[in-house]
Image (tube, rainbow, N blue to C red):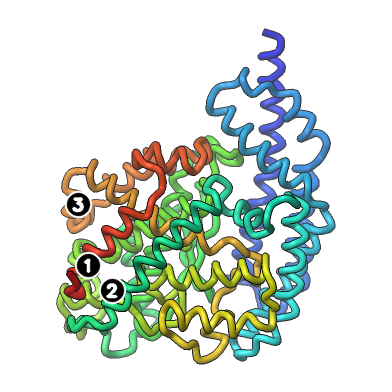
Amino acid sequence: MQKSQNSKKNYKKLLKRVKKISNIGEALGFLRWDQEVMMPEKGTPARAMQISTLSSLQHELFTAKETGALLRKIESSELSEKKQSVIREVKREYKRAKRVPNELIEEISETTSKAIPAWEEAKEKDDFSNFSPFLKKTIELKKKYAEKINPDKKPYEVLFEDYEPYISLDKTEKILKELREELVPFIQKISSSEADINKEVFNEEVSENTQKELVKEALNLLGFKWDRGRLDVSAHPFTEGNQFDTRITTRFQKEPLEAIMSTIHEFGHATYTLGLPQEEYGTPLGESRDLSIHESQSRLWENHVGRSKEFWRLFLPKIKEKIPSLNTTLQEVYESVNQVYNDNPIRIEADELTYHMHIVVRFETERKFMEEDLEVDEIPQYWNRKMEKYLKISPENDSEGCLQDIHWAHGGFGYFPTYSLGSVLSAQIYEKVDSEIDNLQKNIAEGNFQPLKDWLRKNIHRHGKRYTTNELIKKSTGKSLSSRSYLEYIKRKYGKLYKID
Ligand code: MG
């Protein structure tokens, strides 16, 4: 009895500590949001120090003796199953954090804060050499970081666990290999298909103001919670926040489809975050499971809802209200949003098929410079060779080659595979939802997204980190993660669209 009382008392103390640490993390998230959305151009030096100070404070608090002492005193078996999962998560992260010296965390944070503007400039000027010293330094620091956490594992595997701790790199590699083997020939068939797909919906430029109205309209249709959310503009769309305050960003090109689709994508992320239990805020039970699950939610809304004919049956009339001169049919829009861009070098503009090849290129490049002999200066060429191999595309310059994404400037090596895992998982989840909700498609065409939202909230969002990723996938879909549903969905949909048997 005494033991059980003590465990409960110490659990409370630990939770108080965990919440404090989590709130620092939340503040850091909003500082980063501000840096990319609001901050004036020259604010970087101060912001870098603020971020670095808070990161190190967070690390210090978490790795303090008190955290370890509390974890040792708590007998997990004396606690409820829910609380046990909190301990599992805190312990796992504590062990990792404990191994990394504070100075290294600070150095990484300072370096990446400077690497971001350097990357921006390099991308703008198409000058890899502007970014390469920062990238070299970041890689070096991240290798050191991985070695501190586990010198017996390959560095890439350790880094991957930062984003996806409960799906093994072997499993991930297997899925990426299946995608590569199935999709490379399938994309070739599409390239040589004679199907006449409508490619453009908007034949005139749509102003940024009108585009903003369109994406807001899409968010209204889907039921975005404006009293707990915001929409802003940034160079690279992202979502930041928690169950009380979730912010999404978008960006505008000449034609509005990209902004619309990427906003629906971010809406999926936001819906997950907003669906986390409010009463668990600041604890692992109130935090999202890792990136693959997060991405499965954004992909589900973007691809399975946002690219469906039913959604466009609903949304096209709204667009025509804003742009009365628009002369297009539902079928044309459907073809246009689902066209395969077999000559596009940019990941974020890719369709749901070629997308995975962009990921495979990044994955193979990252592993090569992390674990083998690829020098930073050789990255652009290596990248271009891989693009040629899998997509038969030669990027015209590094801005549309290896400089296109911000993630390396953040030190986010190992992050990209979670995009593919999430996309694959979204098909598996959607298949399950479709089998459990009557008239899912009809509901979507009528603008009734509630049954879908309720299903996702009940089966995924409300659990936070209660289950490990594999457990959550199995619990919600009845099966462990596999590429089957995704590949079947892709072949069914694109086989029909491009008239491939
Ligand atoms: Mg995403």
Q: Quadrant of the N terminus?
A: top right
Amino acid of disc 2: Val
What residue appears at the point 80 percent right and 33 percent down from the top-left corner? 66
Left or right: 364 as drawn, with respect to 333: right
Amino acid of disc 1: Trp
Q: Secondary structure at mark 1?
A: helix
* Mark sitting earlier along the chain (1/2): 1
Could you say which is closer to the camera, residue 446 or residue 463?
A: 463
Q: Position of residue 209 (x, y in %)?
A: 39, 79
Amino acid of disc 3: Asn
Residue 221 visible in rendering: no
Q: Which residue is label 1 attached to?
A: 312
Q: Which residue is label 3 attached to?
A: 443
Crowding at mark 1 (Cα within 10 Å: few <14, some 14-19, many 20+): many
| Position above or below: 501 against 51 | below
- Mark 1 residue's CB less than 8 Å from ligand 1: no
Left or right: 451 as drawn, with respect to 392: left
Q: Position of residue 464 (x, y in %)?
A: 50, 41
Q: Quadrant of the C terminus?
A: bottom left
Find residue 337 and name its label.
2
Could you say which is closer to the camera, residue 134 or residue 461?
A: 134
| Position above or below: 309 against 282 | below
Q: Secondary structure at mark 3?
A: helix
Q: Check contact, mark 1 vs mark 2: CB within 8 A.
A: yes
